[in-house]
Image (tube, coloured by chain):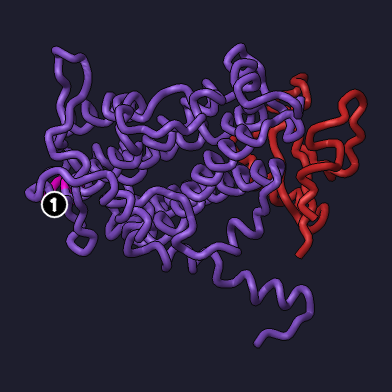
């Protein structure tokens, strides 16, 4: 098995081979899987502090319970993804506690503050929908057996998060007045944020091997369409404006704003009026990370050293 | 803090097969039980148990997580 060239291995996978162990992988496959799992794990992990800090806006004890149940799920999903990474040679300790905030690979959306209840439920409606869109595609297509099995649980629970988000978006939008205005403001910054999350358009996409190794099945643009095919009708049905519409000629969704474009994180506003920017500028913004990046990572890492020291009997400085 | 890998097995209903549903890292058996129960809470399991990965003896394969070559986390 170790003698397989990458091309032979890709062909074998395209013919339906399911990989079950590290020993069977080529180095190219292992690296591509590590990239994918790291993004998945980091995204689940960083959603937890984002949702946790927003849960304080929950309007009742019941909604507190729901919000914290979602956070608990996200942490479990992260834990499972890091566990899978250990099986292919990575260290969970290093990944969770040994990295600087800017080294995490989650999307820019989880570097942003969720400032009220509407932000939290739209994050559940939009970001968790993006999560399901990406992970359902992985579940249906992945050539890595352990990941496919792990995603059964993840998919089941993300569906609950999504339902929580959509039910609350409906409730706020139907109430009208200030409730609807505040949910509209959340939609205004989070819709383009999620669109961007799916990454480079297919015509610019660099060769990543993820499709050849069957680590996913759909392209970035196809996944973006899947997300919009649920999200745009949901928002339209609630009377919420979104900058995209269905085009009957191409039978797909079309964006009504310059894409990609710049984001003003201090104002929580997309700078549509400056027109289209370059993907290089977007990557630069992503790499610089957003306003909550250090706070979220610190909230995960802060107690590790102390407690570890106590347990190991080492006095702390 | 040296955590071990524990594999988690469960069956949803009386009469179902006991299936491998996942894994947790834990310092000891007691914590593994708690982590497994709290992590895999997506079903109302009829039965769940955990086993140290190092206690699993592979029968017919020389590769994979149960051979002790990978994923021990220690």
Q: Camera-side residue: A66 or A98?
A: A98
Does residue A51 belong to the magenta stretch? no
Name the image quarter holding the C terminus of chain A. bottom right
SS label for mark 1 = loop
Q: Is residue A156 above or below residue A285?
A: above
At x 56%, y 36%, the residue is A32
Q: Residues within 10 Å of mark 1 (few under 14, many from 20)?
A: some
- How many numbered marks, from 0 up? 1
Residue A159 seen in the current view:
no
At x 79%, y 33%, the residue is B64
Residue B21 seen in the current view:
yes
Residue A180 locus on image (x, y percent): 15, 45
Chain B's colour is: red
Q: Is residue A315 above or below residue A64?
A: below
For label 1, the residue is: A271
Chain A's colour is: purple
Dividing the picture into quadrants, the one containing residue A80 is: top right
Dividing the picture into quadrants, the one containing residue A35 is: top right
At x 48%, y 51%, the residue is A71
At x 56%, y 41%, the residue is A37
> What range is drawn magenta here?
A177-184
Q: Chain of mark 1?
A: A
């Amino acid at each position: 098995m170790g003698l397989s060239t990458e091309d032979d291995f890709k062909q074998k996978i395209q013919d339906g081979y399911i990989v079950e162990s590290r020993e069977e992988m080529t180095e190219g496959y292992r690296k591509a899987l590590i990239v994918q799992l790291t993004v998945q794990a980091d995204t689940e992990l960083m959603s937890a502090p984002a949702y946790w800090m927003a849960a304080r806006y929950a309007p009742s004890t019941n909604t507190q319970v729901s919000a914290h149940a979602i956070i608990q799920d996200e942490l479990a999903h992260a834990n499972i993804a890091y566990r899978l990474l250990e099986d292919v040679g990575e260290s969970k300790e290093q990944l969770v506690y040994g990295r600087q905030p800017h080294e995490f690979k989650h999307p820019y959306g989880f570097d942003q503050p969720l400032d009220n209840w509407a932000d939290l439920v739209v994050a559940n409606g939009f970001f968790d929908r993006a999560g399901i869109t990406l992970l359902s595609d992985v579940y249906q297509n992945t050539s890595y057996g352990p990941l496919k099995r792990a995603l059964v649980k993840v998919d089941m629970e993300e569906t609950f998060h999504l339902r929580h988000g959509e039910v609350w978006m409906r409730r706020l939008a139907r109430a009208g007045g200030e409730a609807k205005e505040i949910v509209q403001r959340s939609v205004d910054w989070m819709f383009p944020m999620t669109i961007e999350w799916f990454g480079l358009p297919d015509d610019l996409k660099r060769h990543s091997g993820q499709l050849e190794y069957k680590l996913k099945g759909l392209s970035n643009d196809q996944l973006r369409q899947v997300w919009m095919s649920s999200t745009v009708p949901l928002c339209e049905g609630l009377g919420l404006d979104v900058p995209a519409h269905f085009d009957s000629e191409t039978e797909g969704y079309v964006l009504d704003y310059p894409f990609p474009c710049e984001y003003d994180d201090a104002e929580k506003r997309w700078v549509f009026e400056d027109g289209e920017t370059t993907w290089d500028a977007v990557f630069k913004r992503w790499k610089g990370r957003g306003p909550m990046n250090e706070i979220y990572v610190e909230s995960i890492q802060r107690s590790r050293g102390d407690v570890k020291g106590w347990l190991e009997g080492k006095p702390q400085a | 803090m040296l955590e071990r890998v524990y594999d988690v097995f469960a069956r949803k209903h009386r009469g179902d097969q006991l299936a491998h549903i996942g894994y947790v890292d834990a310092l000891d058996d007691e914590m593994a039980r708690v982590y497994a129960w709290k992590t895999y809470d997506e079903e109302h399991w009829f039965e769940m148990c955990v086993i140290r990965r190092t206690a699993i003896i592979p029968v017919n394969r020389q590769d994979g997580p149960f051979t002790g070559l990978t994923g021990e986390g220690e």
